[in-house]
Amino acid sequence: MNDQLKHLSDRVTKGLMTRREFVGRAAALGVTAAVANSMLSSAAKAAGPVKGGMLKIGSSGGESTNTQDPALAASEVPVTTLRMWGEPLVNTAPDGSLDFRAAESVEASADAKTWTFKIRQGVEFNNGKTLTADDVMATMQRHTNEDSQSGALGIVQGISNMKVDGDNFIVELETGNADLPYLMSDYHLMIQPGGGVDDPTGAIGTGAYIMEVDEPGIRHGFKRNPNYWDAANTGHADEVEVLVLNDSTARTAALQSGQVHLINRIDPKVAGLLDRAPNLGVKSVAGRGHYVFIMHVDTAPFDNNELRLALKYAINRQEMVDKILRGYGTIGNDMPINKAYPLFDDTIAQREHDLAKAAEHYKKSGHDGSPIILRTADGAFPGAVDAAALFQQSAQAAGIPLEIKREPNDGYWSEVWNVQPFCASYWGGRPVQDQMYSTAYLSTADWNDTRWKRDDFDAKLLAARAELDEAKRKAIYSEMGVSLRDNGGLILPMFNDFVDGVANNVGGWIEDPNDQMMNNLASIKCWVNA
């Protein structure tokens, strides 16, 4: 039996049999699904990565307005491409540990105020220049400059001083922060020569690939970086092509036909059917991602908390999980934190769908009855248009005049999100609560897409950073979550699983709860079996 199972697992590794077929054959031989999957993982590891060939990815989240400036990356395609040519100091590994990249180690002072990153030696940028600690400092300085419009601005603003000492990059904080290394894993913080000041869009970094084709909204092409420092473990394909396929049906068809090897954002409506296809598999993993409707709390009529509460009580979260996510996720609670985060407070009461309360708050708001415009697009998140329609129906049942305006996908992330006062959006989540709050809810954060600006909230965020007692820190985060839930501009009906599609001849796929497509690293960690 062992020889037969080994033969079958080898066929899966070579892409000649699906995982589902293997588990079924193994069950017929008396092997449990858990043991069968463990055997497949071992077989894949034993086979090792296959070098060469071309890996093709079909991805949503690409627009004609995209740029290779890491500071401005706001959707899936830019994040994928910059992870191919660049690297931050560290990444967050699937198990929550640190994966050291431009830095090879980090040490902290006892009060977590001073952090020393030892910069990896012998690393070259893809233009031939050697990486130095000065490049790291220049990169961080650029992102602390408000003129950069960096999505990492809220993360790096707590830095009081930076300096270089030989091969070390030293960060001094205003208040201690035990989570600082995780903040440095933010995908905006790709290390660039000279900080990218002279050429922020040049796609020059220390990553596994060199960009050869840059056609925003259409496609991006890469060749392997011959001088990449970690070539044994990442950057397996000779070439990688990222095709922008914003339409869900087109993306799915491309995977089924073999035009691409990997796709992101499979629509939950078709995930079960697609997973039965003979040449591919649907991969899903729960994490911190969430689908949202965001209101600018400084813009009428959303500057009225009674109106915000009316909309929050009107939305039917369970209906959206059932009809939009089809079980690939869980209900949200109008705060961006769930049980996937360390120090999550599971005693916070769940907001329930309540049309009577929605109507009561709407009446108290004194709103004049004019249409409340919610903007959405297919590309906002899978099922966003249908979710908006469900929201409209439940709001109307409470007497709230919600009106839906469907926007084009192209330009959505530059012309609608973070610009218009009420729209559909998504967040991939962050490794720790401090990073999530610092990125999107700190008053000075450039990506504060609800315009939530509260001195008391900022003070609590800083206090949580400095608090090394986990119980006390958890209590502070709990207060922050409740405050945002009850007063903020975030309507968070659901936390989504990351649902991706993978051809059977792709090797190296692993579950990563940090973001879609293996934390957007599938392009450099996966390979094509011959």
Image (cartoon, rainbow, N blue to C red):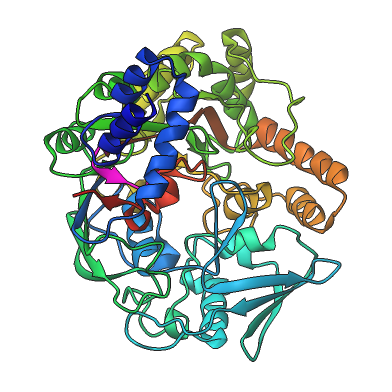
Q: Quadrant of residue 445?
A: bottom right
Q: Quadrant of residue 112?
A: bottom right
Residue lying at 54% horizontally and 31% vertically, measured from the top left:
491
Picture quarter with the N terminus? top left
Res 109 → quadrant: bottom right
In the rendered image, residue 92, in percent from the top left (x then y), is placed at 56, 55
Query: How many numbered circles does the render carry?
Result: 0
Q: Relative to 203, is 470 above or below? A: above
Residue at 77% across / 37% down in the picture?
478
Q: Nearer the viewer, residue 278 or 179?
A: 278
Question: Is 507 inside the magenta-drawn segment?
Answer: yes
Question: Which region shows up in magenta?
Answer: 503-509
Q: Residue at x 49, y 73 (%)?
A: 147
> Is residue 275 at all visible to an observer of this figure?
yes
Q: Residue 185 at what x, y percent from top left? A: 55, 61
Left or right: 245 as drawn, with respect to 329:
left
Residue 239: x and y in percent read 21, 63
Residue at 35 percent across and 63 percent down: it is 84
Task: Name the spot of residue 452 as percent of width and height, x first.
Answer: 62, 46
Q: Is residue 76 left or right of residue 144?
A: left
Q: Tell me, yes or no, whether the highlighted magenta stretch contains residue 173.
A: no
Q: Is residue 401 visible?
A: no
